[in-house]
Amino acid sequence: MSTDLDVANKALRHLGLSPVESLSANSSSMSRVLLDTLQSSLNTVLGSYDWSVNRHFDESVGTESTLVDYPEYRYLHDLTQVGTPPVNFDNIVSIKSPEGLYVTKYHRIGDSLYTAEKDILITYTETLDTVADMPEYLASLIAAHVAMEGCMALTGDGNKYYVMSKIYDRELRRARSQEFRMTPKGYTNRPDSASSFIQAHSGFSL
């Protein structure tokens, strides 16, 4: 597995620059730029696609809500009771019924989620602040993004952006291909939280 420093130095190699010894904000101006760009790249890359590394599944069993006049909001799901706290449900990818149907009509007020389904499976992503534990293909993609985003600040040569963008596009295609081939169906980084739901309803597609 790569470290943040490994990824930063790979980005520097893309740019034809010498590696740094640390990413301490106090060590050099280059390290500070790399730190800022790395965090920005993590947010951009992980937020742009549904990657398995930050994708999670959690089940919820709702209770009867007070919105009796609205059958589509019949059940209340308390998000503070879902998963292993703390869980950030700001980036919900999808909500599905036990039959595998997408629940597209729901209403959320703070930590309260209203749906027509009593039993649901919530798919969501969480932000990460390090490349630790990421597969190599994703670490390489983030390194390419750091090189692309930081090329002007790190080299002063705006012409490098086009070349770096081509490297990023190549790494993106490779990463998506690897993700498709290597990620098992139903993969989750919270195996205990949703395993019973997935096993009980293994006939539907995630």
Image: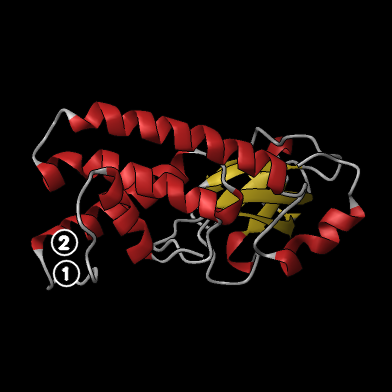
Q: Which residue is mark 1?
A: 25
Rendered position, 171 above or below 46: above
Q: Position of residue 193 (x, y in %)?
A: 73, 66
Q: Is residue 32 left or right of residue 126?
A: left
Residue at 34% across / 48% down in the picture? 41
- Circle 2: residue type: Arg
Residue 128 in which image quadrant: bottom left
The answer, for residue 68, to whether it is visible in the render is: no
Q: State left or right for residue 82 relative to residue 99.
A: left
Depth check: give the residue in front, 161 or 127.
161
32 left or right of 100 in image: left
- Residue at (37%, 49%) from the top-left corner? 143
Earlier in the chain: of badge 1 and badge 2, it is 1
Q: How many marks?
A: 2
Marks 1 and 2 close (CB-CB < 8 Å): yes
Which one is in front, 158 or 37?
158
Residue depicted at 57% across the width and 46% down the height: 51
Identify the element where label 2 is drawn: helix
In percent of width and height, residue 15 lies at 24, 43
Q: Position of residue 67 (x, y in %)?
A: 66, 45
Res. 150 image quadrant:
top left
Which residue occupies 37% across, 62% down? Answer: 6
* Residue of label 2: 32
Q: CA distance from mark 1 to mark 2?
A: 5 Å
Q: Quadrant of the C terminus?
A: top right
163 lies above or below 182: above
Mark 1 neighbour density, 10 Å: few (under 14) some (14–19) many (20 or more):
some
Can residue 89 be seen here? The reply is yes
Three-letter code, disc 1 = Ala
Q: Position of residue 110 (x, y in %)?
A: 48, 54
